Image (tube, rainbow, N blue to C red):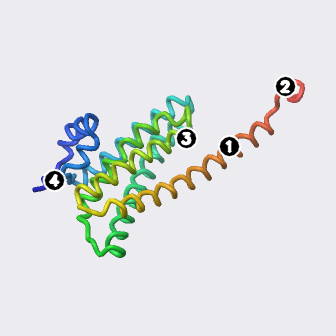
Amino acid sequence: MVVRQSLRDLPKLLGTFARDPVGTMRSPLTLSWPAITSLVLGSAIVSGVLVGVLSRSLLDFLIGLLLFPLTSLLITIVFTFFIYYFFSLFKSTFLEFTRLASIVSLAMVPYFFVHTFSSFAPPIDLIGFALTGLLLIVGLVEQFGLDRKVCVKLIGGLGAGFFIIWSVVQFQSHAREKTEQERSPKTLEEMK
């Protein structure tokens, strides 16, 4: 029997998840919609704000406070719909949507934790997404009884897409920084 956990149960669930993430993903899990939304937004706000503080950038702080949570919620919704419709259309398997959204939102927590340190080493985001992918595979296989190979291929494809998008963003960011460095005066002589 699956018990729908409310917003009030979220701290206890996160404590259990911190001690045993794989075990938590294996156990039946259905969060209420306010709990799902709060989990994603809260994790993203904490992560985004800490990125801004650690990078000592007001702009990064504001992005982490305002933009990162909204894009994180949107990405979580897109991932959930993508997985749901993938199995519905290609495998004729209809997953319980609320449980699927619960699994996706809880699996995103390690990404948010690891993302906190991305201002020091941007590739750490890839490690966070890999952890999220592994937990998604565990949750899909254990809670829905789906074929492990299919789940690995699906999540691997999503991971490849994440890697491509991440690479493009890093390249653009690096190019922008290089252009700004070339434009800025290097000595007092050049400033005159």
> Type of residue at label 2?
Thr
Q: Determine whether label 2 and label 3 are within 8 Å by CB.
A: no
* Label 1: element kind: helix
Residue placed under numbered mark 3 in the picture: 123
Q: In the picture provided, is 181 more to the left or to the right than 40?
A: right
Residue placed under numbered mark 4 in the picture: 4
Q: Name which quarter of the figure residue 42 lies in.
A: top left
Q: In which quarter of the image is the C terminus?
A: top right
Q: Determine whether label 3 and label 1 are within 8 Å by CB.
A: no
* Image height of 190 relative to 48, above or below: above
Q: Which of marks 1 and 3 precedes in the sequence?
A: 3
Residue placed under numbered mark 1 in the picture: 174
Q: Which of marks 3 and 4 precedes in the sequence?
A: 4
Q: Where is residue 183 in the image (x, y as percent from the top left)?
A: 80, 39
Q: Which residue is drawn at 71% across and 46% down?
A: 175
Front position among marks 2 and 1? 1
Q: Which of marks 3 and 2 precedes in the sequence?
A: 3
> Type of residue at label 3?
Pro
| Count of picture labels | 4
> Type of residue at label 1?
His
C-alpha distance separating marks 4 and 3: 36 Å
